[in-house]
Image (tube, rainbow, N blue to C red):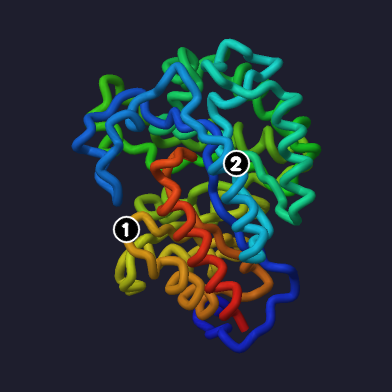
Amino acid sequence: MAGSRAFAESTAPRKLVWGNLLHLGFNMWADRPVDSWGGPMPETKDWVTASDRLRFDRKLWNDLFVQMAAAKMNLVVIDLGEAVRYDSHPELAVQGSWTPAQLREELARIRSLGIEPIPKLNFSSAHDAWLGEYSRMVSTPKYYEVCKDLIAEVVRLFDDPRFFHLGYDEETAAHQAKYSIAIVRQYELWWHDFEFFTGEVSRHGVRPWIWADYVWNHPEFAGRAAKNIVMSNWYYGTKFDEKDKMVKAYRDFETAGYDQIPTASNWSAPESFKLTVEHCRRVIDPARLLGFLQTPWMPTLEICRPHHEAAIKLVGEAIANFQ
């Protein structure tokens, strides 16, 4: 069985992704008490609710890309959300949102640094405050129409990207227990909408990419989901004990034959990235290990500079030590 072999001595046949997640938009929660945020920084009270202005610092953004290029990182996942004044749905824009022309210009600059930009729109009902009023219309005809429009427009803006990240994480009642409104798709409705989104992306000739935590509580996901989907399981701890379903998921997806981009973070443990690389090289066949993704999970604001810079440094160290 493929998932039972050790692959540490193998050489990957393709150029690996060494990526980072950066936020243009940060409207992920409609509302959430400050004390439920947690994380490595205390100055979070203005980040946990949706804002009518763009929370973004351009100088920090520019500096981070210079550092990513110097670290030999080659991909960035850009969480767009409310940060773009979409031609198809300008009503989603906030104060400071970029025009499509501004975004296109920036994507060209990013590519000139040797970094591949990948779009992300999170369609999980736990993280879709950026959708404004449509976030309360989940699974309705209007919702499907709006989401279809946005996917098509973003694919065009990114000039037919290799991947399109759909998010899709943490859509559970527990994750929304402190929201003023909780919307959770379940059973066949969840599958219907998931297949709608992945199908829309695939229809444009782009590979869907998702956070794959659904498998933790629904093991049948590793097998039923379409095989063209890139799976990003994530684990931010340090133990890597396969008795933990979060860790075991890497092997489950390998056994089922999915391409993976394992995801780490310096959110709670700086060594997460290094340990993720080490573990996943052991359990994932190089033919299906597309690379690795770092996720700082902080807005692009100056106050978060040390956290972002530390995240990049950790990836740079892993790249330098990769053999």
Is residue 189 in view? no
How many C-alpha atoms fall within 10 Å of the one at disc 1: few (<14), some, or many (≥20)?
A: some
Q: Where is 258 relative to 108, above or below?
A: below
Q: Which residue is mark 2?
A: 78
Q: Quadrant of the C terminus?
A: bottom right
Label 1 sits on what residue type? Ser
Q: Position of residue 114 (x, y in %)?
A: 75, 56
Give the structural element (helix, strand or loop) at label 2: strand
The answer for how far apart the CA atoms under marks 2 and 1 are is 22 Å
- The picture quadrant where one finds residue 185 is top left
Q: Where is 10 relative to 308, above or below?
A: below
Q: Which residue shows up at 60% across the image and 41% down it? A: 78
Q: Which residue is mark 1?
A: 268
Residue projecting furthest to the left: 35
The answer to which of 197 and 293 lies nearer the viewer is 293
Q: Where is 313 relative to 299, above or below?
A: below
Q: Which residue shows up at 64% across the image and 24% down it? A: 98
Residue projecting furthest to the front: 59
- The picture quadrant where one finds residue 271 is bottom left
The answer to which of 236 and 280 lies nearer the viewer is 236
Q: Where is 101 relative to 121, above or below?
A: above
Give the structural element (helix, strand or loop) at label 1: loop
How many C-alpha atoms fall within 10 Å of the one at disc 2: few (<14), some, or many (≥20)?
A: some
Q: Which residue shows up at 55% across the image and 55% down it? A: 231
The answer to which of 118 and 41 lies nearer the viewer is 41
